[in-house]
Image (spheres, coloured by chain):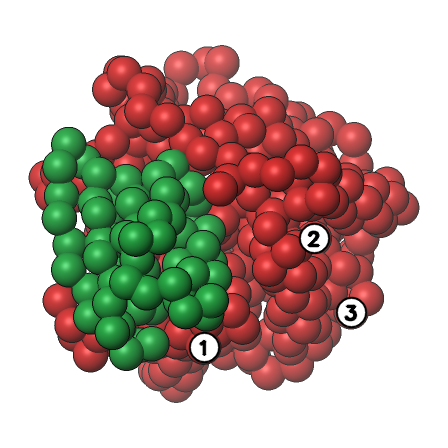
């Protein structure tokens, strides 16, 4: 595939993903939350009883679909490869704090784009923080930051997370008593598209992201590092297509899918400083991880067990965030959440320093 | 010939190591990677730098030869 085809492919994929995200909201997902990897992992953690926030508990089929879509396409194309061993515990910690940053902002980088496309100007400050975090990560990358090499593992290792997704799907459909679901009208966890629609959306987006290597962090990072615009083009395409869909939907339905402003936005708060600092932590942590939460799910589907560990770190972060009052709400950030974000930035900085200046790795 | 062993390294490290070699004028050089994403990224970067790239694959390891 030549460069022009690559770029056209990722723009097309971005346009399709933006439409799918907008349609999921029409079908029942919360506003500006057609996709949110952080929110959906948090909801799934709640459904499994890992946290007790009754308003955000639901096994999100989009997550199941993303991993399985990537797994199926990677297997079909001969790109599935079980590997791992690149600082898994460090990746767990990074994943944990990336989630703390996401839940300060109330969204992952993917939802940040969708919030922008819905007219939520709080996400502009999130984007500013996100770019600053990426620049911090790039500072360390250019000085030799590395978490070391991955190694080949038995195929079974790489299949564990995809199999767990099948188990989650069974639990969602069977709905046994020990799985928690937010009651109707009880919060964002109760707002969701039908299972089949969400699952299909996840499968398609997972496959598209696997094929195009779409990554929200990689887009900005590659422009800064290499003046390479391919991944950023996908990012921009998602924004453009979700924006156009939201404007059309606002025109033809009674619901305001696009509402320009800071106040009164869906599942968002207006504390600009903490929106920015939350996303700074996300950008910084994700550069050190090598990709955004969406990319981690897709890599996990391709058999990368380090990414699977990162996903588990994200889930653990979500559980902690809601068990210890770290997550923001529409009212704003909490005191505990502010401390956790500052602590997270410090921990991520220490990880960056130790793996840049601590010892020679990677070469 | 300079050998850049980028096997097992995660994105964007293979491209960064390649950039280091290309910037130092160590061409021709060989870059070893172990996944299609790194192969595509290194190829794209090298071609943007005006290099010719040939790729050989054996046992899941891609060896890219970069020259001008």
Label 3 belongs to which residue?
Answer: A272
Measure the C-alpha gap from mark 1 to mark 3: 29 Å
Rendered position, A10 above or below B50: above
Q: Secondary structure at mark 1?
A: loop
Q: Left of A237 or right of it: where is A273?
A: right
Q: Nearer the viewer, mark 2 or mark 3?
A: 2
Instruction: From the image, state whether disc 1 or disc 3 is nearer to you.
Output: 1
Q: Are marks 2 and 3 on the same chain?
A: yes
Label 1: chain letter: A
For mark 2, name the chain.
Answer: A
* Residue at the spot of label 1: A227
Q: Quadrant of residue A133?
A: bottom right
Residue pictured at 13% horizontal, 37% vertical: B58
Residue drawn 38% across the image and 37% down it: B8
Q: Earlier in the sequence, mark 1 or mark 3?
A: 1
Q: Counting residues from the N terminus, which is met first, the one under dot 2 or under dot 3?
A: 3
The relative height of residue A168 versus residue A278 in the rendered view (above or below) is above
Q: Secondary structure at mark 2?
A: helix
- Confirm whether circles 1 and 2 share one chain: yes
Write down the quadrant of residue A4 in the picture.
bottom left
**Residue A109 placement (x, y as % from top left):** 53, 59
Gap in angstroms between the C-alphas marked 1 and 2: 23 Å
Q: Residue furthest front?
A: B1
Q: How far across and how far down the image is residue A293, in percent?
A: 49, 47
Chain B tint in image = green
């Amino acid at each position: 595939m030549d460069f022009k085809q690559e770029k056209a492919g990722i723009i097309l994929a971005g346009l399709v993903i933006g439409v799918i995200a907008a349609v999921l909201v029409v079908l029942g997902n919360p506003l500006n939350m057609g996709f949110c990897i952080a929110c959906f992992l948090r909801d799934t953690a709640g459904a499994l009883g890992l946290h007790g926030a009754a308003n955000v508990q639901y096994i999100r089929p989009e997550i199941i679909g993303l991993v399985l879509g990537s797994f199926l396409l990677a297997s079909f194309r001969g790109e599935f490869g079980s590997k791992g061993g690149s600082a898994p515990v460090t990746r767990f910690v990074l994943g944990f704090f990336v989630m703390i940053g996401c839940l300060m902002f109330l969204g992952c980088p993917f939802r940040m784009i969708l919030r922008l496309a819905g007219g939520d100007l709080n996400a502009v400050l999130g984007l500013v923080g996100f770019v600053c975090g990426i620049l911090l990560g790039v500072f360390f990358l250019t000085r030799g930051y590395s978490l070391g090499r991955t190694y080949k593992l038995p195929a079974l290792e790489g299949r564990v997370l995809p199999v767990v997704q099948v188990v989650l799907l069974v639990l969602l459909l069977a709905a046994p008593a020990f799985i928690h679901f937010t009651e109707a009208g009880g919060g964002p966890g109760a707002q969701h598209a039908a299972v089949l629609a969400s699952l299909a959306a996840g499968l398609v987006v997972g496959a598209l992201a696997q094929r195009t290597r779409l990554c929200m962090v990689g887009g900005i990072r590659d422009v800064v590092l290499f003046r390479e615009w391919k991944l950023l083009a996908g990012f921009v395409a998602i924004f453009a297509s979700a924006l156009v869909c939201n404007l059309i939907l606002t025109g033809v339905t009674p619901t305001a899918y696009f509402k320009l402003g800071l106040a009164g936005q869906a599942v968002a708060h207006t504390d600009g400083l903490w929106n920015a600092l939350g996303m700074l932590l996300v950008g910084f942590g994700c550069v050190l991880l090598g990709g955004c939460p969406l990319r981690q799910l897709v890599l996990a589907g391709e058999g990368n067990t380090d990414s699977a560990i990162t996903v588990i770190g994200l889930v653990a972060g979500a559980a902690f965030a809601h068990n210890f009052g770290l997550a923001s709400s529409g009212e704003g950030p909490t005191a505990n959440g502010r401390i956790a974000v500052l602590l997270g930035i410090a921990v991520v900085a220490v990880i960056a320093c130790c793996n840049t200046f601590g010892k020679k790795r990677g070469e | 010939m300079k050998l850049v062993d980028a096997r097992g390294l995660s994105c964007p490290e293979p491209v960064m190591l390649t950039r280091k070699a290309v910037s130092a004028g160590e061409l021709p050089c060989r870059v070893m990677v172990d996944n299609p994403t790194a192969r595509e990224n290194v190829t794209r970067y090298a071609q943007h730098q005006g290099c010719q790239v040939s790729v050989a694959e054996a046992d899941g390891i891609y060896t890219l030869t970069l020259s001008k």
